[in-house]
Each structure stands twice: as structure tokens, then as C-alpha cells.
């Protein structure tokens, strides 16, 4: 589990953290509205520019891409059934949640990910 904090404000207090390849490939596909609202953090071992898909997602998702220095390098809202989205810069973490839950986070912001 993890907490996403930006500008001393807790944005997502109870995110699931996924580190294994199968879990990262599935992400929020087939997830309930409650799980999507809680959010998910897909954690990589190192920075990359791997594409993200929303095939089998039931609703649009808001995503931020965070590098190893905890700086937001990209932000996007993806509709369901997008085959692949490749972020503008390499990232280490992808935070996925419902649309409008990440409204106050912008590209260039420094975020704090508290893992517990």
C-alpha cells in the first residue's frame, strides 16, 4: 500500500502497489469503481518509457508518470480501449486512478510516495 502526497495534501491515501509484471500488465483492467477510486501505483525497478494500455478498462483513467526523483514527467486521461500510450519521458512509477482525482497535480510537480 502507498499514499500519494503533493504540496502537503494527501491525494490518494490508500493506493495498491504492484511490482510484479503480470500485475502491472493487468493494472486496473476489470477493476470495480471502488478499486479505481482508490488508485494503483505500478512500480518499476528502473525508469523506462514502456507503453500503457486501457484495453478491457470499463472507464477512462487519469494517470501520472513519476520519475525516480519523484517528479511528474507526464499526465494523461486515457479512454477505455486505447491500445498504447507512450509517455513523453522515462518514468519509474505510474499512478492510475479515476478521472479528476489527480486534478491538482501537474507536470513538473514533486510528489511524495509513502509506501507502507
Image (cartoon, rainbow, N blue to C red):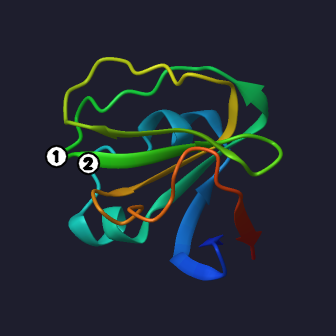
Give the Cα separation between the discs numbered 1 and 2.
Answer: 7 Å
Can you identify the residue that label 1 sits on?
58
Q: Residue at x 71, y 57 (%)?
A: 110
State left or right for residue 69 relative to residue 74. Answer: right
Q: Residues within 10 Å of mark 2 (few under 14, many from 20)?
A: some
The quadrant in which the C terminus is found is bottom right
Q: Nearer the viewer, residue 21 or 51?
A: 51
Pointer 1 with pointer 2, Cβ within 8 A: yes
Q: Nearer the viewer, residue 20 or 61?
A: 61
Expressed as whole percent of the image width and height from the top left, the position of residue 30 reads 26, 48
Return the mark for residue 5. Answer: none
Can residue 51 be seen in this snapshot? Answer: yes
Q: Earlier in the sequence, mark 1 or mark 2?
A: 2
State left or right for residue 57 relative to residue 85. Answer: left
Q: Nearer the viewer, residue 53 or 75?
A: 75
Expressed as whole percent of the image width and height from the top left, the position of residue 42 reads 59, 46
Expressed as whole percent of the image width and height from the top left, the position of residue 54 reads 30, 33
The quadrant in which the N terminus is found is bottom right
Can you identify the residue that label 2 sits on?
30
State left or right for residue 68 relative to residue 53. Answer: right
Amino acid at each position: 500500500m502507498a499514499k500519494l502526497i503533493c504540496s502537503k495534501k494527501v491525494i490518494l491515501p490508500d493506493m495498491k502497489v504492484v511490482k510484479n509484471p503480470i500485475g502491472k500488465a493487468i493494472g486496473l483492467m476489470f477493476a470495480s469503481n471502488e478499486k479505481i477510486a482508490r488508485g494503483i501505483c505500478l512500480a518499476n525497478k528502473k525508469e523506462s518509457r514502456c507503453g500503457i494500455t486501457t484495453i478491457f478498462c470499463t472507464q477512462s483513467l487519469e494517470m501520472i508518470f513519476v520519475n525516480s526523483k519523484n517528479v511528474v514527467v507526464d499526465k494523461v486521461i486515457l479512454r477505455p480501449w486505447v491500445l498504447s500510450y507512450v509517455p513523453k519521458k522515462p518514468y519509474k512509477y505510474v499512478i492510475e486512478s479515476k478521472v479528476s482525482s489527480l486534478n491538482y497535480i501537474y507536470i513538473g510537480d514533486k510528489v511524495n510516495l509513502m509506501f507502507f
